């Protein structure tokens, strides 16, 4: 009988070990299934250790490295989610372990509850780096990837460090066609339903009372996209959320509002455009037009960057598969081919 290959990962204390193993050992069960290994805890006078055993040396190595990455993550997180564990497994299996290094570091800011906000995936870290290094950043990708939340965190950081004097948050109120007059109440009451996700992120970073004070002082401003026209936004961190619902004209108007010592982050999901009558998305046009322009970055998130419930990632992949199939069916129809020939001046496809 062949002897099992074993690797040992030193753990500083029992609390850290408990975080790595997770509730009812759910985290190590995921690792065991993914790498076909056995993981056990050993306590001693010199501290805890995690023993990883198996028949395949590569699988044991990857599982031990996964435990090491989870240990680093557990040092700065109260709990490790199954999404985080799954992400580490996926990255190791894809041979991208070098990209995981330092992912648990580089805290963006601290919430009012003392929770550190930081990138949870490599894609999120690149997004944060892009915001740091560029004046305008487009964050494009599916729901749940942290596009808006991380942008707000970066805005709060810039405000706290006095890099800017105010934060401006805006969204297209597409459901009301940017005409909010029929809604009851003042402007703030009218736009509240459309800007709720931005409020939630701000409450997380600043707390409800501090947020309200900053709002009253004008340090934080929230307004629909239509109200940006004619303004010049100096010394500001500006976030345009749900930008896929902006028209090309609105997007151009917004981008040309940028003033001195300002930064803009534009977020959106091109698969969830609500514009009527097949109108082009201003986000899609801007990404094409501005690609390669100096000091402007376009960051594309993937389903790997989803940090919500694991089902969200599966839903996104299922929809992508469905939409690809439907597009292939459409491309195969005689009517579609005829339309393509007409659009290309009668050329055969």
Image (spheres, helix red, strand yellow):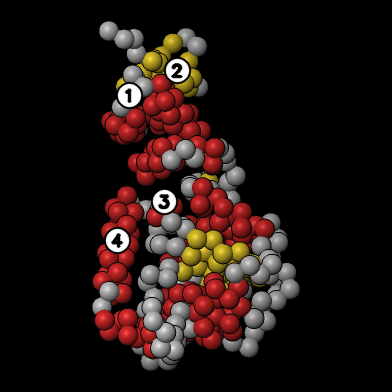
- Residue underneath mark 1: 37
Q: Nearer the viewer, mark 2 or mark 3?
A: 3
Residue at (55% x, 67% y) in the render: 138
First in sequence: mark 2 or mark 3? 2
**Residue 56 appears at what percent x and percent y?**
36, 22
Q: Is residue 317 left or right of residue 201?
A: left
Q: Is residue 327 left or right of residue 287?
A: left
Give the CA distance from mark 4 to mark 2: 41 Å
Disc marking residue 304: 3
Residue 260 vs residue 65, the one in the foreground: 65
- Residue underneath mark 2: 8
Dots 3 and 1: beta carbons under 8 Å? no
Give the CA distance from mark 4 to mark 1: 32 Å
27 lies above or below 243: above
First in sequence: mark 3 or mark 4? 3
| SS for dot 2 | strand
**Residue 230 appears at what percent x and percent y?**
63, 88
**Residue 172 appears at what percent x and percent y?**
46, 79
- Residue underneath mark 4: 321
């Amino acid at each position: 009988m062949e002897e099992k290959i074993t690797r040992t990962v030193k753990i500083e204390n029992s609390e850290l070990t408990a975080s790595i193993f997770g509730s009812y050992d759910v985290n190590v069960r995921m690792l065991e299934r993914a790498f076909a290994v056995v993981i056990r805890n050993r306590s001693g006078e010199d501290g805890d250790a995690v023993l990883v055993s198996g028949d395949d040396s590569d699988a044991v190595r990857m599982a031990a490295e996964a435990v090491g990455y989870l240990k680093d993550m557990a040092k700065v997180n109260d709990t490790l989610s199954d999404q985080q564990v799954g992400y580490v497994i996926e990255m190791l299996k894809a041979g991208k372990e070098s990209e995981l290094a330092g992912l648990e570091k580089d805290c963006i800011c601290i919430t009012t509850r003392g929770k550190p906000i930081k990138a949870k995936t490599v894609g999120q870290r690149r997004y944060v780096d892009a915001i740091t290094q560029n004046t305008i950043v487009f964050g494009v990708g599916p729901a749940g990837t942290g596009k808006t939340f991380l942008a707000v965190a970066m805005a709060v950081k810039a405000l706290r460090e006095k890099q800017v004097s105010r934060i401006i948050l805006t969204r297209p109120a597409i459901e009301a066609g940017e005409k909010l007059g029929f809604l009851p109440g003042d402007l703030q009451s009218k736009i509240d339903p459309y800007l709720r996700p931005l409020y939630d992120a701000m409450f997380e970073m600043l707390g409800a009372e501090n947020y309200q004070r900053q709002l009253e002082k004008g340090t934080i401003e929230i307004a629909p996209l239509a109200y940006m026209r004619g303004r010049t936004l100096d010394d500001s961190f500006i976030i345009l959320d749900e930008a896929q619902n902006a028209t090309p004209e609105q997007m151009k108007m917004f981008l040309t509002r940028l003033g001195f010592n300002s930064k803009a982050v534009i977020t959106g999901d091109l698969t969830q455009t609500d514009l009527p009558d097949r109108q082009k998305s201003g986000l899609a046009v801007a990404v094409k037009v501005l690609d390669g322009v100096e000091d402007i970055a376009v960051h594309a998130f993937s389903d790997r960057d989803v940090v919500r419930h694991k089902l969200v990632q599966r839903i996104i992949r299922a929809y992508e598969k469905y939409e690809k199939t439907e597009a292939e069916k459409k491309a195969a129809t005689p009517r579609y081919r005829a339309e393509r020939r007409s659009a290309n001046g009668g050329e055969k496809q």
